[in-house]
Amino acid sequence: MIPLIDWAQNDVDPAGFAAEVGTACRHTGFFVLHNHTVPEQLRADVFAQSDAFFSLPRAEKAKVSILNTPHFRGWGKPGDESLDENSPLVDSKETFNIGFDLPADDPRVVAGAPFRGVNQWPDLPGFADTMLAYYDAALALGVAIHRAFARDLGLDPDHFTSAFDGPLAALRLLTYPPGTGAKNEIGAGAHTDYGAITLLMTDGEPGLQVQPRGGDWIDVPHVEGAYIVNIGDCMMRWTNDIYVSTPHRVLPPKRQRRSVAMFIEANPDTIVQALPGTGTPKYPPIRAADYLMSRLDATYAPKEVS
């Protein structure tokens, strides 16, 4: 139910690749992409740096807490986030968020524009350089995937490209502790992603599940070196519900589980509205930044834990 798609096909048959991607996006909203362009060594370095960060003492991680800034960058401790807005449960995972990198004197940073703060960096050699290199590589792949979306939807292949040259995209490191067996424990609550697409790499530890429309929860297969790619709510809205954003969750793993998610989000001022040829609009136009803020406000709202 979750197709395996070969990125190499895009070089020899872009139209056929786009049709295969489009079919996946219309049905499960998930696919697994292998033979992609992000180097293996860079991906290994990201996991190594992520492990080094999450192994730091809690007091060191707290110096770069996501709660220190309104721009959603830095360390999220267990309980800071609840992805299932309809559940009192909080997620057991730890996270670290990295955004589009800007210097402190950038006019957008100085003005305090939403999502335009500076990144917080832990005192770890090579951490920032590794993460920024990976951010650029994953973003480039994400933008290239949007060329396939455009072809599938009957648009110019470059239709989306200019919408991602200063994006809201966020790189997120995640670690999930082993489950304890406690009642109602959850690694990450059931949710849909907020943006255009997500590129997820994992260490292979099971736990990620998807719930296709009208179906039961199914496990997402692990393919070594491949990305799990899924449609987010913003892209579903952009395509006027032609592409589907599918609920997913992470069950408490048997062993520590590590993953790295690249959330591909459009530029803040991009107007998200029904694309040409997608029919009568189901949603009013909205700025990408306003849509994202509305979703994050709900995610980080305090909850009473039962």
Image: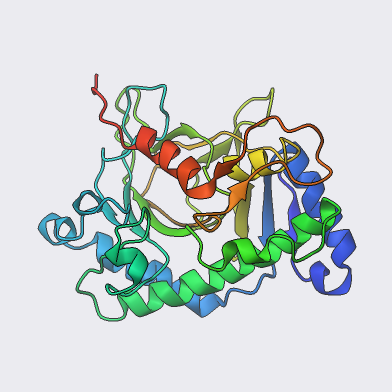
Q: Name the image quarter holding the C terminus.
A: top left
Residue 40 at x, y = what percent? 55, 76
- Give the residue at x 25% y 80%: 125
Give the farthest residue toward the left.
59
Instruction: Decide if residue 19 is on the left or right side of residue 47.
Output: right
Residue 216 at x, y = what percent? 63, 25
Residue 30 vs residue 153, the one in the foreground: 153
Residue 144 vs residue 269, the one in the foreground: 269
Q: Is residue 150 above or below residue 103?
A: above
Residue 178, quarter of picture: top left
Residue 183 vs residue 276, the one in the foreground: 276
Residue 150, quarter of picture: bottom right
Residue 222 at x, y = what percent? 59, 53
Give the farthest residue toward the top.
306
Residue 211, quarter of picture: top right
Q: Is residue 90 above or below residue 19?
A: above
Q: Can residue 119 be seen at all in this image of the molecule? A: no
- Give the residue at x 65% y 32%: 283
- Give the residue at x 82% y 68%: 9
- Give the residue at x 85% y 66%: 14
Q: Can residue 76 be seen at all in this image of the molecule? A: yes
| Colouring used for the render | rainbow
Q: Name the image quarter holding the N terminus.
A: top right
Q: Is residue 238 above or below residue 184?
A: below
Residue 16 at x, y = what percent? 89, 60
Q: What is the total number of numbered labels drawn onto the structure image?
A: 0
